[in-house]
Amino acid sequence: MPNEIINRVTNSKLISIDLEDFYPKGERVLFDIKKWLFEDQILKEKDFRVYVQNHDWSSYQNKYVALTCLSDAIIPSWAYLLITVSLSPYTKKIVIGNLELLELSIFQEIINDFPVVNYSGKQVIIKGCSKHQIPHTAYSQLINKLLPVAKSIMYGEACSNVPLYKRKNMNNL
């Protein structure tokens, strides 16, 4: 049929990677220790230890937690580590920093475990649009991991992509 519409995208050899498919479920929480400081500025060790001991850590069950202090107080490292000891049995992950650092840390693990062998010699397109906020660095880390094995790497959608890389010699795989 001369007027038949052919979907070239579905017939292509492109393999799509959508990092959103790997987005782990679980609430992200920012835990601010400022409320446990004397006048929001001074950490008194004895009082701090009491707060840590008496806090209900079970409310963080299966959550991702970023520990921070939103005041400009100087917090000793051990304070965050003390909280980590109590919080660890309940959470999926803990970082010291903000929610952006938490998300980056989550995706670093995902990229480290990413099975690049499945993409050896393949034309890969990395989807860019997602409902969840995927850290830009995660895309960069994924590309670094794919470069040694992929035939080509593109970004975007199959119908409108940006070519990023094309292997000149497939014998180098």
Image: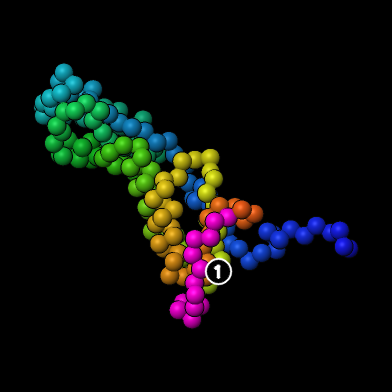
Q: Position of residue 150 (x, y in %)?
A: 50, 68
Residue 122 seen by the camera: yes
Q: Position of residue 118 (x, y in %)?
A: 52, 67
Q: Position of residue 117 (x, y in %)?
A: 48, 69
Seen in the picture, residue 17 relative to 61 is either above or below; the reply is below
> 50 or 76: which is nearer to us?
76
Which residue appears at 49% of the width and 40% of the height?
A: 132
* Quadrant of the image occupied by residue 36: top left
Say what secondary structure mark 1 lies in.
loop
Seen in the picture, residue 48 relative to 76 is either above or below; the reply is above
> 72 or 87: which is nearer to us?
72
Which residue appears at 35% of the width and 37% of the height?
A: 99
Q: Is residue 93 left or right of residue 171?
A: left
113 is within the stretch colored magenta? no
Which residue appears at 46% of the width and 77% of the height?
A: 173
Residue 118 seen by the camera: no
166 is within the stretch colored magenta? yes
Q: Which residues are magenta?
A: 161-173
Position of the N terminus, as image quadrant, is bottom right
Q: Position of residue 131 (x, y in %)?
A: 53, 40
Which residue appears at 44% of the width and 66% of the height?
A: 147
**Which residue in the protein does label 1 denote?**
122
Q: Is residue 53 left or right of residue 22?
A: left
The residue at the far right in this view is 1
